[in-house]
Image: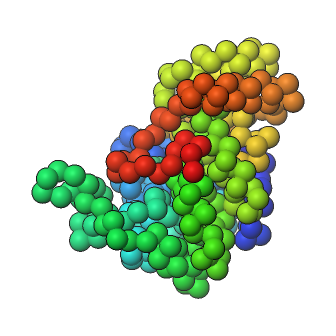
Amino acid sequence: MANKTYKLNTGQDIPALGLGTWQSEPGKVREAVAFALKSGYKLIDCAYCYANEEEVGQGLAEAFAAGVKREDIFVVSKVWTTYNTRVELGLDKSLKSLGLDYVDLFLVHWPLLMNPEGNDDRFPKLPNGERDIIRSHNHVDTWKQMEQLLKTGKTRAIGVSNYSKRYLEQLLPHATVVPAVNQIENHPALPQQEIVDLCKEKGIHIMAYSPLGSTGGPLFSAEPVVKIAEKHGVKPATVLLSYHFPRGSTVLAKSVTPERIKENMNVIDLDEEDVKLLKDYSDKLTSEGKLQRFVYPPFGIDFGFPDKS
Ligand code: 1BO
């Protein structure tokens, strides 16, 4: 299962499982990336915003020195909101830090613009302490710039992240290139079914981040998750990662611990009964209004989540 791939609308193969680097502790990411790639991971998910791309680049270099081939792996990065009017500059910065001359996929991290004059300040603030968001910016203009990037060869595909149904519906009528991917928070307590269904209909692949919710959070002890884990003799985390394969999505497993990085590769095939149990759980939370979003937008803007258009 860990070697499974999907086809993107570009024709590229994208691995079903990847290593996430968001919130990976500095000083540990290099080793984690190198270890994951040497252990067989094929996808590394990064972003300028995560402030660790240089270290990720060191891990990539270590893996290449150990024989991992660039063409055999899939590297994802994302343009940060302060670069949403200068996406090529944002990509250049990521490429420099990663030590690469192209990424396989480059995403718009969030559909809004933060004051570009803040430059390397990732969260520029107004004097009153509020986020310095340029509200007159239209996220479709960012996408138009993203489309131009394909001509540069610096990315093989382009996509979006954290786009709700509403944002996708605003974007798609103007898109010459349909996003290859929408990377969203996704797990049984936040199925985001409307977004997932729309993306499927439009040929946009889903990448799921924060698949475990929060560390030690409620998903680990959710009844259906525990029941399925016991049935297959695996850990709840394995069930939560495996949840995405029947849904046709790629899942990002974040860890800097070698044992856990290895363990996360032991994803399994869930059977129909498991899929139903997890769907019933999601449906129950949805109907009770108890969906759980663990990652809140860092901007104080209503992005239409969860499952709201
Ligand atoms: C704020 C970052 C969310 C995951 O990419």
Residue that lies at the very extreme toward the left in this rendered image? 127
Regarding residue 44, the answer to whether it shows in the image is no
Q: Residue at x 38, y 51 (%)?
A: 301
The residue most toward the bottom is 151
233 relative to 143 in the view: left or right: right
The colour scheme of the drawn protein is rainbow
The residue nearer to you, when weighing 40 against 235, is: 235
- The residue lying at 52 percent from left, 45 percent from top is 305
> 73 or 136, which lies in front?
136
Q: Is residue 299 left or right of residue 302?
A: left
Report x, y in % for residue 94. Answer: 43, 66
For the N terminus, the quadrant is top right
Residue 223: x and y, percent?
67, 15
- Where residue 120 appears, x then y in whole percent? 27, 64
In the image, 126 versus 65, the foreground residue is 126
Q: Is residue 84 visible in the rendered structure shown here?
A: yes
Q: Nearer the viewer, residue 72 or 194?
A: 194
- The spot of residue 54 in percent (x, y) is 39, 58
176 shown above or below 304: below
**How many numbered marks appear?**
0
Please tell me which residue is depicted at 77% across the width and 23% down the height of the picture: 277
Residue 205, by quadrant, is: bottom right
Image height of 306 relative to 291, above or below: below
- The residue at 38%/40% (across/down) is 25
Q: Is residue 136 left or right of residue 234?
A: left
Q: Quadrant of residue 87?
A: bottom left
